[in-house]
Amino acid sequence: MPLTQEQVERFDETGYLVLPGALPADLLEELRREADLAVDGARGLEASDARYDLEDSHRPDAPRVRRLKTPFEHWPFFDRLMRSPAVLDAVEPLLGPDIRIHNSKLNMKSAHFGAAVEWHQDWAFYPHTNDTGLAVGIYLDDVGEDNGPMMAVPGSHRGPVFDHHSRGAFCGGVDPGLHDVGHERAVQMTGPAGTFTLHHVRAVHGSALNRSNRPRRLLLYSYFAADAWPLMGLEGATLEEFDKRICRGRPTLEPRLEPAPVRMPLPVAPKQGSIYENQKTLTGRFFEQFEEVA
Ligand SMILES: O=C(O)CCC(=O)C(=O)O
């Protein structure tokens, strides 16, 4: 499913793209099955760990998973999907032939209480030597305006990198009361299960609390051109491990340096481990939060 020239130009201009129902039906079915199996594995867990990010309201006998962390490292299906033509054929026209995965997560915005994600730019978390990067989102459920669709601000990928700090440390979110992120222009990316959402690594995006009675699960794969190298270093990975992250094409030892605004995500957030924890230290949160009624 390569993109049309018109789609490539639209992504370049707006920094986002929605491809309704792009994932073939058999893969969507497998994805949903694998996600259910993985979530079952959180039963009995007392606290978040390397695989699971749990809702504050999680109980070991009533699991509430807010995110599967880096699923391709823990469940083989997610590695296979990340390297499959079903996904990469939509990425190559935008990043070029050599593609490296940077990170991945499956955000479970559960019915009634699924957490909001504050406005942010992925670039603020992981600046690289060039900004040829994007995230592909794959909806596991039908997503409308009421169950927390991904939202993006058109054209924001060409603008500044906003301050994602609060109280003297990185917090992974922007307070729109302090910075003009353009959120009033944000576009809701809705579509049936299997829809791809693509957003540029510098695009401002976020999503609201899911108050509906339907889940909104979104698998995200963040890719870069292989010649974009992370400015924060390889985060403990060896070169061999780094190169194994190439999903298509070849690795390189020659990073491409392009001008792009950068702010280092330092000092690190006091609450690390997930974007939800990071963003708890953001003063001036934009989206409504879930508060359990006792
Ligand atoms: O799940 C969402 O709606 C947004 C997720 C996101 O942007 C992120 O996890 O970086």
Image (tube, helix red, strand yellow):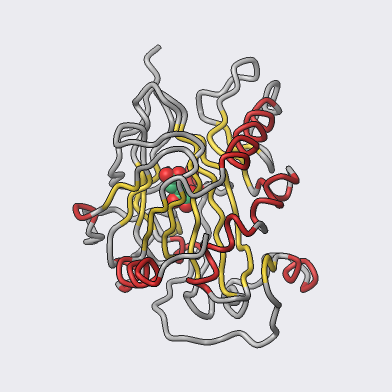
Residue in view at x 42 percent, y 85 percent: 259
Q: State how many labels appear.
A: 0
- Between 217 and 196, the residue placed more toward the observer is 196
In this orientation, which residue lies closer to the viewer: 141 or 22?
Answer: 22
* Residue sticking out furthest to the left: 184
Compared with residue 2, is residue 62 higher up or lower down, i.e. above or below?
above
Work out whether residue 205 can be spotted: yes
Is 275 left or right of 285, judged from the image as shown?
Answer: right
Where, quadrant-wise, is the C terminus in this rendering? top left
Left or right: where 102 falls relative to 12: right
Residue appearing at x 51%, y 37% in the figure: 140
Write the residue at 39% across / 36% down. Answer: 143
Examine the image and state in which quarter residue 170 appears: bottom left
Q: Residue at x 73, y 50 (%)?
A: 73
Residue found farthest to the top: 294
Is residue 279 visible in the rendered image? The answer is no
Relative to 114, 60 lies left or right: right
The image position of residue 263, as x and y in percent, is 43, 72
Determine whether 28 is above or below 110 in the image: below
Q: Position of residue 208 (x, y in %)?
A: 34, 39
Lateral position of residue 21 relative to residue 32, left or right: left
> Quadrant of residue 16 in the image?
bottom left
Relative to the observer, which residue lies in front, 45 or 207?
A: 207
Q: Position of residue 255 (x, y in %)?
A: 61, 84
